[in-house]
Every structure is written in C-alpha cells, then in structure tokens.
C-alpha cells in the first residue's frame, strides 16, 4: 500500500500540495485530475521519489526503485537510437533487443527503432519513454499525463497499451490527466485536486457522473461543451 500522511510541498512560499491523508491500494488504478497547476505533477513526483515533501511522509510500500515505473510529463531522450533508449530500462535482462522492440511495438513506434531519439517529436518522445517504462513488469506505474502530446490515434494506442500492461502485471497505476474522459476509460478511482488539496476522492463513475464537491463540478462543467 502507498500512503501519504500530512504531506505538504511548497515552491518558494506557495503551497503546491497539501494532503492530510491518502492511501492507494495495491492493484488499483487511480486517476489524478484537476486543472493546470492543481498539483498533479507534484503528487506524481512525490510518489516517484524524485521530489521530497517539505512536511509529512510519503510511503511507497518500500518498493525498490526498479519496481517503480515513472513517466515524467516532459520525458527525456538520451542521445542514442530509440531502441537503445528503451533498452536502458533492461539492465540485467537477456534478449534486450527483442524485449525493447516488443515494447516499442505496443506504443506504435517499432518503425522508429533505429531513429535518433533526440530528433523525435514531443509525442513520439513521450511514447518512447512510455515504452521504456512498459518494457518490464513493475509493481507501481506512475504516468504524468501520458497522452498529453498524442493525437487521437496515438491516444487510443497508448491507453490500450497501459490497460493491457496493468491487466498483465497487476501493477498499481497512478496517472494524471486533465481529461475526465480518459479517467473514465482507465481508472477505478479518481482523485480530483483543487489548488493542491483533495477536492474529491471516490469511485470513478461516482466522481465523474455525480460529483459532490463544487470544485469538481466546476472543473467537469468546463469539459461538457
Ligand atoms: P499540474 O501538474 O496539476 O499542472 P504542478 O504540480 O505542476 O501542477 O504545479 C502545481 C503548482 O506548483 C503550480 O502553481 C506550479 O506553477 C507550481 N510549481 C510546480 N513546479 C514548480 C517549480 N519547480 N518551481 C516553482 N513552482 C512550481
Ligand atoms: Mg502537470
């Protein structure tokens, strides 16, 4: 289980995240939604351990680093070809090339295996980084807006790859999205952030179809045009 207790994160004097308590159960799929600046990336980075809280504790079930797959909102491309970028996730494995290619195929990038990674577009870089994360089984998958730079076709492909991976590995999935429709398709529970605080937390259908908090209603309303 993942647990946050009395967690606060500030940038300068401003509080970006303030979460008294949050538990995430093994195997659940939690969507973190909310407008720009509501603290989604901050929460995911705290869970990934790349950011430390100013107060409180973040306990990610004592998972070793290799069991956590983290896709940052702006992923990084090493100056290697695409396949080698994915192989970086496969230190100890035999048949690295084959595994990396299978991961690239799942995100629709097999045709770019030998392309130079730092020449890819934003959306392609994001898919390559996702392939790096999905190349091997993990206990915890943390995806920060995994389809932010994807077109509709790529988005469908990525969502399918994530769902298949979650089913096959039984991993815990925490992802952020600014799109409620994506939360509906991928999650079992939704955490709606409101200026760094928990606006609402509950089962996906309940939060998205009959939100209780005024902040969630306002956020969802802007999507029903
Ligand atoms: P979201 O991912 O929901 O858009 P973030 O977690 O990125 O939100 O940001 C939450 C708030 O913290 C925003 O107001 C943002 O401007 C601020 N913030 C995030 N990262 C930094 C940083 N490195 N330095 C200063 N402010 C930051
Ligand atoms: Mg963000």
Image (cartoon, rainbow, N blue to C red):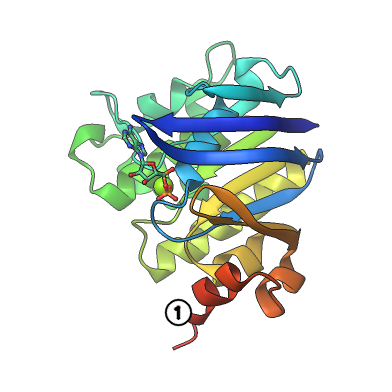
Task: Tell me if I can see residue 147 in this picture.
Answer: yes
Nearer to the camera, 66 or 137:
66
Q: Residue drawn at (29%, 34%), measured in percent from left and top? A: 114
Locate residue 117, reporting x and y percent: 26, 34
Q: Residue drawn at (56%, 32%), measured in percent from left and top? A: 8
Q: Quadrant of residue 115?
A: top left
Element at badge 1?
Answer: loop
Locate residue 139, reporting x and y percent: 72, 30
Q: Is residue 132 left or right of residue 47?
A: left
Locate residue 154, reporting x and y percent: 42, 61
Q: Is residue 215 above or below residue 115?
A: below
Nearer to the camera, 171 or 154:
171
Q: Is residue 2 left or right of residue 42?
A: right
Q: Residue drawn at (47%, 79%), measured in percent from left and top? A: 223
Q: Is residue 25 above or below residue 213?
A: above
Nearer to the camera, 155 or 207:
207
Circle 1 sits on which residue?
222
Q: Residue drawn at (81%, 40%), measured in percent from left and top? A: 25
């Amino acid at each position: 289980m993942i647990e946050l207790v009395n967690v606060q994160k500030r940038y300068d004097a401003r509080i970006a995240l303030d979460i008294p308590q949050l538990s995430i159960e093994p195997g659940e799929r939690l969507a973190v939604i909310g407008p720009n600046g509501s603290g989604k990336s901050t929460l995911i980075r705290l869970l990934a351990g790349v950011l430390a809280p100013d107060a409180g504790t973040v306990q990610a079930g004592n998972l070793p680093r290799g069991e956590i797959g983290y896709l940052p909102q702006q992923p990084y491309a090493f100056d290697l070809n695409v396949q080698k970028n994915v192989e970086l996730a496969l230190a100890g494995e035999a048949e690295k090339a084959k595994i990396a290619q299978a991961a690239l195929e799942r995100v629709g990038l097999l045709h770019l295996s030998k392309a130079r990674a730092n020449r890819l577009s934003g959306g392609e870089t994001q898919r390559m980084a996702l392939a790096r994360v999905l190349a091997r089984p993990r206990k915890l998958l943390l995806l920060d807006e995994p389809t932010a730079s994807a077109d509709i076709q790529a988005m469908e492909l990525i969502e399918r790859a994530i769902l298949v991976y979650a089913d096959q590995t039984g991993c815990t999935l925490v992802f952020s999205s600014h799109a409620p429709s994506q939360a509906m398709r991928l999650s079992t529970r939704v955490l709606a952030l409101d200026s760094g605080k928990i606006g609402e937390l509950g089962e996906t259908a309940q939060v998205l179809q009959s939100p209780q908090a005024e902040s969630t209603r306002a956020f969802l309303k802007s999507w029903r045009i």
